[in-house]
Image (cartoon, grey):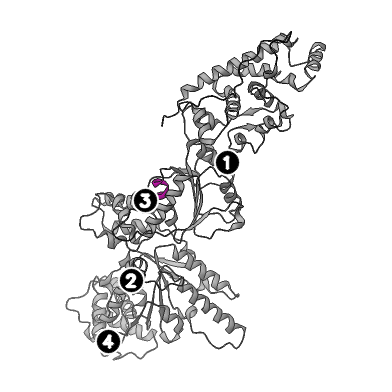
Amino acid sequence: MTSPSPSALPARLARLRERVAALVEHRAATDPTADDPLRGLYLSEDAVRHLLHRADGPAAHDPASYDPAAPGDPPAPVAPLGAPGRLDARDPLDALAARLGLTDVDTAVLLVALAPDLDRGFEPLYGYLNDDVSRRRATVALALDLCGLPVHDAAARGRFHPSAPLTALGLLVVDEPERPFLSRALRVPDRLAAHLLGDDTPDAALAGHIRALSAPVTAYEDGDGEEAPDTRFVRRLAALLAAAPLTVYVRERREGDGLACVTAALHAAGLSALHFTGPEERVPDLLREVRLTGRAVVLTGLPDKPETLVRALTAAADVPVLITSQGPYDPQWSEYDPLVLEAPGRRSGAVDTWAAALGDAADTGLDLAATVAPYHLGGERVVRAALAARGLAAFDGTPVTAGHLRLAARQQSASGLERHARRIRPDVDWRDLVLPEGPLTQLRELALRARHRDQVLGDWRLSAGGGRGRGVLGLFAGESGTGKTLSAEVVAADLGLDLYVVQLSSIVDKYVGETEKNLERIFSEADRTDAVLLFDEADAVFGKRGEVKDAHDKYANMESAYLLQRLEAFDGIALLTTNLRANIDEAFTRRLDLVVDFPFPDPEQRLALWRHGLKHVPTVENIDVAPLAKEFELAGGSIRSAVVTAAYLAAGRGSAVTAADLLDGARREYRKAGRLVPGEGSW
């Protein structure tokens, strides 16, 4: 298709100038005050008589109705500007008219209003025809005269109504509403003039509120076998968008899923789009912008009160509008219901998107699929995370490693969980766990489930159904200090995720229903965030339901019932710890994927814990901790505390840790627990 050329505008302006000249000549031939230098500033008797003569009938105001054979009349004016003609694809006005469905008369009115912005020579001419040298823009009456339309014709006057195409599309502004209708000034937005001259810089009013939506890094393509749900979604939506302008509301379960799908669909349909993040007051400017450039509108997320914004966007039937949000669509928002769809979400890990965004910057030994499996970032965030990983790798002077990818992905998964939970950046690994083989195997299985849940529950369709989410839930049961919290941190580190420890003081509320609201905020935020949620001392909120004896029991049971339902629909990773497994309601236990029991360490494990704790601590030569492991029955947390105490004692002396320091630390842990110290003073 031939691109419109601004060089076609001068020819249009020349024809308009001929029309203006004809009106000027007619005015000069019939108006006795035409040569008066003060014309328009006062009314003489001759001017009044002339005006009274002109007011004999409606036809006197219609330049196209003058009879060239009538005595005293001027020559007939040139053909009206609104006369139909052949569209020229190179003419920007014709191209705009064809795209927006404007009539020839609409195009002519637009040219009349636009002329002073393109050629200063029209300003004094318009001032003369307006009988006021200070009014240098076209008025409604002048536009009707130049277009050969009678000023008393209701249809002609209706072209300047707020609901008429030119004004409704934001192409024409009728100013000075306090003036009589025919004397109101007409103007066009500067953005329209710039567009017709070939400048498509977005309107300054939209600065900071729009950005061009880039093409997806990878295409949604059919794989081997059955077509994937996300590919099928994109293909069907692209076909509808290519056929006609469409308003679509896409509900997403995780932030970014909807944007990734609509971006791919728009690209497949051959449409470009503007991503809008501004207030509702900027919607008219936005719609004019996309109409001028032939783009679609993409809106992600909605404000708390979206009625006005959604109503304004859904009313634009000629513009493709795609809205993505995690909330459901409310029919009360607009009388024009959009097509409401559910986003299928990207396939597990979106490895193809990561690979395309990383290019050849990744380390050759990097297992990309395993590294990115825990993350559920949308397509755009994957690109940003990949760019951030490349920047981190460049800073380190190495290819992109798994560590770079994990750090960059965590940065893209910003969370509001910190309002209710304490964030821990894991700095441990499997080597920091000293556990029997059974619990250790279960912990590795937990990480395995978190990595492959989308494949098993989604692609292989092993989800239980009934609205059950794809979350991974685990319970860590054992005495205090046996490694439950440390194990949660290790699992999070293995997955490359942050650990959020829920602060029970911030969610438990004495008022009825407030605890459930706080929990809902946490679960909702965790659903959309790539993180591990840890409920430490979970007995407080996941305890057993009891017999209802008073109102307190009733509402406590309601709280437990809410938690049971919410865990069913949870999509994230949640770990619960308890010192006494029997305190957890059996209904919760049934919904858990794994229950890991942490046994109290035996002498052999205690010896390993002492040695592990001293791994990086300077000690005297040939120090023996075997007697400590045998005599002092301490859990891993207490052993670590004993080592810390010994380290401070040694640091205060400026020497290495001795066996006496360790003994002193072990005894202090026994005394803190109120236990009798074995071999007091004899070891």
List the residue tagged with mark 3: 384
Between marks 4 and 3 in the image, the one whose residue lies nearer the viewer: 3
What's the residue at 31%, 53% (across, down)?
389
Between marks 3 and 2 in the image, the one whose residue lies nearer the viewer: 2
Which range of residues does the magenta coloring cover?
263-269
Disc 4 packing (10 Å; few <14; some 14–19; many ≥20): some
Disc 4 marks which amino acid? Answer: Asp
What's the residue at 52%, 60% (across, down)?
327
Disc 1 marks which amino acid? Answer: Pro
- Earlier residue among tags 3 and 2: 3
List the residue tagged with mark 1: 284
- Earlier residue among tags 3 and 1: 1
- Earlier residue among tags 4 and 1: 1
Disc 3 packing (10 Å; few <14; some 14–19; many ≥20): some
Nearer to us in this view, 417 or 292: 292
Looking at the image, residue 250 sits to the left or right of residue 411; the answer is: right
Which quadrant of the figure has residue 422?
bottom left
Disc 1 packing (10 Å; few <14; some 14–19; many ≥20): some
What's the residue at 58%, 31% (across, down)?
103
Pinpoint residue 412: horizontal percent, then vertical percent: 39, 56
List the residue tagged with mark 4: 602
Disc 2 marks which amino acid? Answer: Arg
Pinpoint residue 213: horizontal percent, then vertical percent: 43, 45
Pinpoint residue 234: horizontal percent, then vertical percent: 40, 53
- Earlier residue among tags 4 and 2: 2
Magenta span contains residue 454: no
Magenta span contains residue 267: yes
Please identify the dominant SS of the magenta region. helix
> In terms of secondary structure, where does tag 1 sit?
helix
Viewport quadrant of the N terminus: top left
Whole-angstrom CA distance, mark 4 to mark 2, is 29 Å
- Earlier residue among tags 4 and 3: 3
